[in-house]
Image: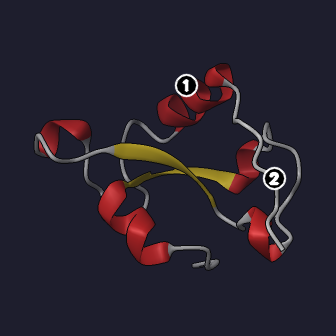
Amino acid sequence: MTVPRRQIPAVTRWLVMVRDRWTCQHCGATDSDSDSTDLQIDHIVPWANCGPDDPDDFDNLQVLCSRCKLKKGNRTVG
């Protein structure tokens, strides 16, 4: 079953980036480390795994680089 995705509001994305100091929470990469580092917002407990339905839930959001986000997939890593 496909779960419809809702956008995380831009202000929430910005506030999570600021909170996490524009740093990947898994490997510590930053945008300034490399031209290829792409920081993204990630759900700690994915919606696909019954994560919180509120896109503004700061406690369920973190910054990950694209490499770490791809490795994590839709798993909960703790």
Judged left or right of residue 43, residue 26 is left
Across and down, in percent, residue 60 comes to 72, 55
Disc 2 designates what residue? 4
Residue at image coords 87%, 44%: 54
Label for residue 42? Answer: none
Q: Looking at the picture, how far across and down is residue 52, in whole percent?
A: 86, 57
| Image height of 68 relative to 65, above or below | below
Q: Is 49 placed above or below 42 here?
A: below
Q: Position of residue 25 (x, y in %)?
A: 43, 57
Q: Amino acid at mark 1?
A: Trp
Which residue is found at the position 73% from the left and 43% from the top?
58
Total numbered labels = 2
Bin the neighbour count of mark 2 within 10 Å (Cα to Cα): few under 14, some 14-19, many 20 and up.
Answer: few
Q: Secondary structure at mark 2?
A: loop
Residue that protrudes farthest toward the top in the picture: 11
The CA distance from mark 2 to mark 1 is 23 Å
Outermost residue toward the front?
1
Image location (x, y in percent) of residue 20: 48, 42
Instruction: Give the camera-side residue of 26 and 72.
Output: 72
Query: What residue lies at 49% left-to-right and 29% top-to-bottom?
Result: 18
In which image quadrant can residue 71 be found? bottom left
Near mark 1 (Cα within 10 A), the count class, few <14, some 14-19 or many ≥20, is few
Identify the mark nearer the N-term, 2 or 1. 2
Q: Compared to 14, does 7 lie above or below?
A: below
- Please, what is the three-letter code of the amino acid marked with disc 2? Pro
Residue 14: assigned label: 1
